[in-house]
Image (cartoon, rainbow, N blue to C red):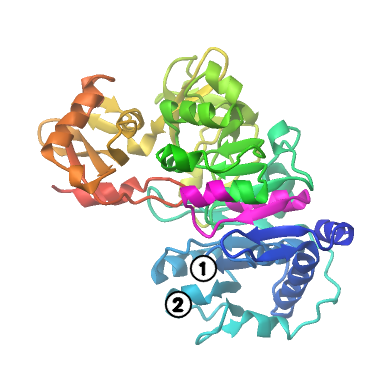
Amino acid sequence: MPILSRHAARRPDATACVMHETGERITWRELEAGSRRCAQLLLASGLRVGDVVAVFMENHRRYLEILWAARRIGLYYTTISAHLKPDEVGYILRDSGARALFTSAAMAGVATALDLPELRLRVMLDGAAAGFEDYDSALSRVRADGPLPDAPEGTDFLYSSGTTGRPKGIRRPLAQLAAHDLQRSDLWWKRFDEHSVYLSTAPMYHAAPVRWNMNVLRAGGTCVLLARFDPERALEAIEQHRVTHAQWVPTMFIRMLRLPEQVRSRSDLSSMKVAIHAAAPCPVEVKRAMIDWWGPILVEYYSGTEAVGRTSLDSQEWLAHPGSVGRPELGEIHVVGDDGRELPSGEIGTVYFSGVPPFEYHNDPERTREAYDHRGWATIGDVGYLDAEGYLYLTDRRSHMIISGGVNIYPQETENVLATHPKVADVAVIGVPDEEYGEQVKAVVVPLDAADASDALAGELIAWCRARISPVKCPRSIDFADSLPRTETGKLLKRLLKDRYAGR
């Protein structure tokens, strides 16, 4: 019996998922029936094992229903950022070879601008628009109780966030599903069951929310979805739903820590067993403050959409190795120098993994080749080092490196220092053209209070930085901005900043 069918048979009226803001609840019976009917719609539209279904919408009560429909009949599902423009959405749809598109009325402005005649099915939730069929009307055309084919389980076919260029699709053979789908359920912090309540704080179109939500449901747990992250709302959701597990990114930690103490202490967080975080480096001071507040329940992991490997560590390990992202959970780590030689502990180089299933960037064999070395070790371009106990520390991405006067500077350390200044809400450090040194270090800062943006604050921040790290790593100039280009999982789109300063 399929996994959803088993949960629906055992606990038909229990809650499978809930939208926190609206209180809309989906029972296991409803998730089972809805995903079966949606699967029938896909089959009736001519989709077969290995075809691609695209989902382009905001966090929605029926999002997981659509993903499970694709999964149970051997389809790939590609989730697309709700913030993309028509040409960006169109690129992903064409590149992935999608045969069906599910969107919502909230996305109608972009969705109706798409010109993709190869799609066999175009469906819109919460209404209809030109070129799209209403979702409920489309479902009414098929039988909910019709048989489903015996097919391999489908999986995600996701696109990177495009921090260094066009998003890249990562697609694996369906046979590798078990090898890369949140492996190692033996780890204590991944042991979900029907008593688990998982708070999903980020948009569903990112890799981590997609994979974690699907695995919680596989185990029979309950998923609580936020429409969008808000620090007070997230704390309220933990208390209201008695959340046991939740996933965060460092920018969320920073925003919660900056809430007034009376707001932070208002919600009962005692149900929380595991606070998982990843996606971006977490400044040491920020993580220490979170452990002081929530206790030693934080678990950090390092990986990527490509799943070339994974590390993790719990709070006790981190306190003994502050700044680390853990030891290998999946694969074996190698730190490699520019000459291709594996480096000893303590030396900085490119981080590679071996012993994991291979992957490829869809329709991009050159980028796939660049991700592997001559030994078959794979990298996503991060730079770091191992300590004597095998714990990994990331210093930055190779593509972010600044070369100033022949000195290699990794800006992550500088960003971490500036992020701890009490007047800084967000910060990015980049290299900008310099006639004498080739590049100079510049910080782009979002002040906590826009009224503070001034030459005086710029000088204060530079002094703050110089008091803590080598002057060569510190910014020579600071610009102020209202916001920085980040994905909603906290990844900084530095290419957009660098493009802004190119040629200056």
Residue at image coords 19%, 42%: 452
Q: Looking at numbered disc 1 in the image, what kind of residue is underneath it?
A: Leu
Q: CA distance from mark 2 to mark 1?
A: 10 Å
Compared to residue 187, the image places residue 341 above or below, namely: above
Residue at image coords 33%, 30%: 410
Q: Earlier in the sequence, mark 2 or mark 1?
A: 1
The residue that label 1 is drawn on is 93
For the image shown, how many numbered marks are present on the structure? 2
Residue 36 relative to residue 62: left or right: right
The residue that label 2 is drawn on is 114
Residue 479 appears in the rendering: yes
Circle 2 SS class: loop
Report the magenta residues as a range.
209-236
Residue 175 relative to residue 443: left or right: right
Circle 1 SS class: helix
Q: Is residue 215 magenta?
A: yes
Residue 472 appears in the rendering: no
Q: Position of residue 159 (x, y in %)?
A: 51, 55
Q: Answer few, some or many: residues within 10 Å of disc 1's Cα (few below 14, many 20 plus, some between 14 and 19).
A: many
State which quadrant residue 149 falls in: bottom right
Residue at image coords 51%, 77%: 105
Q: Position of residue 238 (x, y in %)?
A: 61, 46
Residue 262 relative to residue 221: left or right: left
Q: In the image shown, does 211 or 480 lie closer to the viewer? A: 480
